[in-house]
Amino acid sequence: MNPRSLESIRKGKAEDDDDMVFFIFSALYSHLMDSRKRIKRHSSILYGKKRVRQILDGHVKNCRVAFRMEPEFFRWLASYLRNERLILDSRLKVEEKYQMSA
């Protein structure tokens, strides 16, 4: 055998080993993720109007995560929807309805 054919055999074996390691790692990772107990990131006992108020009055990042916007813009948008009568207050306020749809 010439040196090039030996080199190609070694490279092929190395690629097969890499594929096997990747396969084993991905199978193990998916097993660990499936068997892991899910834990809520934010476990607040508040709901409805109190929850919206807590998010809007709290840290800006919490509002960005929950509503995907700044608190001032959320308040402006809720006011606009209310004034244009696109969403009406009922048992639930506009802010709560909009928060549920986000």
Image (tube, grey):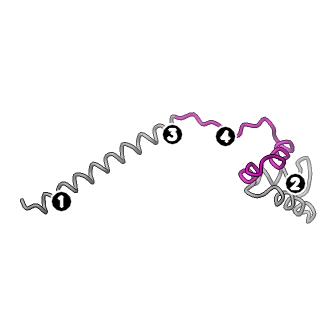
Corner quadrant of residue 82 = bottom right
- Which quarter shows the N terminus? bottom left
- Which quarter shows the C terminus? bottom right
Name the residue type under label 1: Ser
Residue 41 bears which disc, if any? 4
Label 4 vs 2, first from the N-terminus: 4
Identified at 71% across, 40% down, the residue is: 42
Q: Which residue is mark 3?
A: 33
Count neighbours of disc 1 (C-alpha within 10 A) and say few if under 14, some if 14 to 19, many if 20 or more. few
Image location (x, y in percent) of residue 61: 73, 51
Give the Cα separation between the discs numbered 3 and 2: 38 Å
Instruction: Report the side of 41 relative to 63 (left or right).
Output: left
**Mark 1: secondary structure:** helix
Label 3 vs 2, first from the N-terminus: 3
Q: Which residues are magenta?
A: 36-65
**Magenta region includes residue 52:** yes
Image location (x, y in percent) of residue 77: 84, 61
Q: Which residue is mark 2?
A: 94
Name the residue type under label 2: Val
**Mark 2: secondary structure:** helix
Label 3 vs 4, first from the N-terminus: 3
